[in-house]
Amino acid sequence: MPDKDEAPRLEPELDKALSDLLEQTRKEPLSPRLQELADRLAKALAEARQ
């Protein structure tokens, strides 16, 4: 069983899809709630890449 503190690694296809989604959120107006979620997703994606 993996260590609880160990973040799962991203599959390349998932990483690309999430990156594309975040790029699209930068180009379109979002509600404050969706912008907050996009920011959280960007942070989680950056942490998973480390």
Image (cartoon, grey):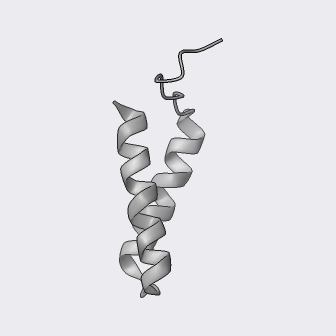
Q: Residue placed at 53% from the left, 35% from the top?
A: 12
Residue 5 x, y percent position in the rendering: 46, 24
Q: Residue furthest front?
A: 4
Q: As drawn, is 13 to the left or to the right of 48? A: right
Residue 49 x, y percent position in the rendering: 38, 34
Q: Quick check: 24 above or below 3? A: below
Picture quarter containing residue 30?
A: bottom left
Q: Residue placed at 43% from the left, 47% from the top?
A: 44
Q: Quick check: 9 above or below 30? A: above
Q: Residue placed at 33% from the left, 30% from the top?
A: 50
Q: Quick check: 47 above or below 26? A: above
Q: Nearer the viewer, residue 6 or 42?
A: 6
Q: Residue placed at 38% from the left, 79% from the top?
A: 27
Residue 7 x, y percent position in the rendering: 48, 28
Q: Residue furthest top?
A: 1
Q: Image quadrant for the N terminus? A: top right
Question: How many marks overall?
Answer: 0
